[in-house]
Structures are given as C-alpha cells and as structure tokens.
Image: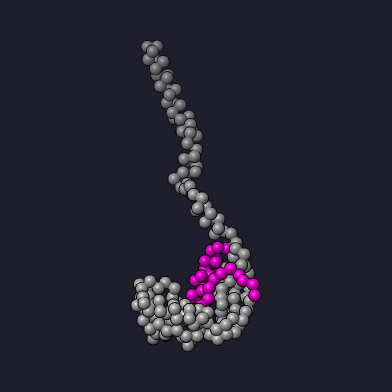
Amino acid sequence: MRKAILLLLLANVAFFAYRYVGPSLWHDATPVAQQLNPERIRLIGPEEFARIAASRRAVGCIELGPLATGDQTRAEEAVAALGQGLKVSSRRVDEPARWWVYIPPLATRQAAAQQEAELKKQGVEDSSVINDDSNFRYAISLGVFRSEDAANSRAEVLRKRGVRSVAVGPRDGSGPRVYVQLREAPEAVRLKLFDIKDSFPGSEVRACQAN
C-alpha cells in the first residue's frame, strides 16, 4: 500500500513538472530556433560580399559622350533623372569629324526592331536603333569611329558576317562636343548610365577625362 502511494506521488510530481516546468525548459533550450529563424540565414562568400559592398560605394566621376551640342540639354536631363541629388555637370571639347557604320533608315520602328533582332542572330551585339534624329530615324547604328579607314574596316567585317545594306558615312563634322559628367555616383546609377548611352549613338561611358 505504501509503495502504491509512493508511486502515485511520484507520478503526480512528474506530471506537474511536465505540465508547468517542461514547456519553459523546452522553450529555453531552443532560443535560436525560436527567435532567429535559422532557415532564413544565408552565408555569403567573399566575392558576393565584395559585390554588395561595391553597389553601395560611390565612384569618383564618370561621363557620357561625346555628344553633339544640341543633345546636351536632353542628355543632362536624362542623367539627372537617374536619381535625386546627383551631381551632374558637362564639359566641351573640340574634336575632329567622326565616321559611322550604319544600316539606312527603315520604314517603321517595327521593321528596325526586326532588323536589330536579325543582327543579334548574326552575332552583332553592339547595335542601336536611332529614334531621336529626324534625318536618320529608324536607322541602325553599328559603330562610330574617328577615321574613315576604321569605319570601312568595321563595315567589311559585318559584310563577311552576312549583314546586308551596311553603309559608311560621316556622322558629324568637326567642332565642339559635349561630355555630361556624373560625380560621386553609386554603382547602381553608373549601370543605368549604360542604358542612356543607347539613346546617343556614338557615345560611351567612361571615367572622366580632363579637357
């Protein structure tokens, strides 16, 4: 009888411990799982860490150009629209005439887009459709060069790839050119500048140069 009472007492103690003490002990035993959601933790390597850090780091000065003087205002507005508080300026230089390789204007925007898609199939990636030049609207620029010889060499390479209707001609005369400069821009903004470049055939994005 005494043994039965003792067993019953022990059973009650065990039940009490499980009912009132056990949950808190279990909770305390797994604080990380309860609070940090370890399945959401992702370790990153040094290369990814460097990429993330670079995306937040400002670069000294980059510029878009060369541009015709008539495109200066449009380019400055496009660059300024990339973000608030950006430091946008410009510089002018005198440069010689340039030559470009292009496919003459097509009838419609759709025809130009189809032609550009065909060029990509032929391995020509550096092409852009002209939209903002009334004299060459829906032409396709295939490169702008500082000499006629360089332009002709580029045209010959394209013809060997099977690109038809390739033409070479002066893009603009000698005279002043404009470079739009962007200072202390984050990496993410610099990448967007490459998208703007496509609206200004013959321009490039590079580190700022002195006059």
Q: Is residue 210 magenta?
A: yes
Res. 113 visible in picture: no
The residue at the point 51 percent across, 74 percent down is 197
Q: Is residue 37 magenta?
A: no
Q: Is residue 96 left or right of residue 12?
A: right
Q: Residue 105 appears at what percent x and percent y?
A: 42, 85
Is residue 185 shown above or below 97?
above
Q: Is residue 183 left or right of residue 169?
A: right
Q: Residue 143 appears at what percent x and percent y?
A: 47, 77
Residue located farthest toward the bottom when viewing the structure as drawn: 135
**What segment is highlighted magenta in the picture?**
186-211
Of residues 119 and 49, the one drawn nearer to the viewer in this rendering: 119
Residue located farthest toward the right when viewing the structure as drawn: 211
Quarter of the rendering containing residue 114: bottom left
Is residue 185 shown above or below 52?
below
The residue at the point 44 percent across, 22 percent down is 13
Residue located farthest toward the top when viewing the structure as drawn: 2
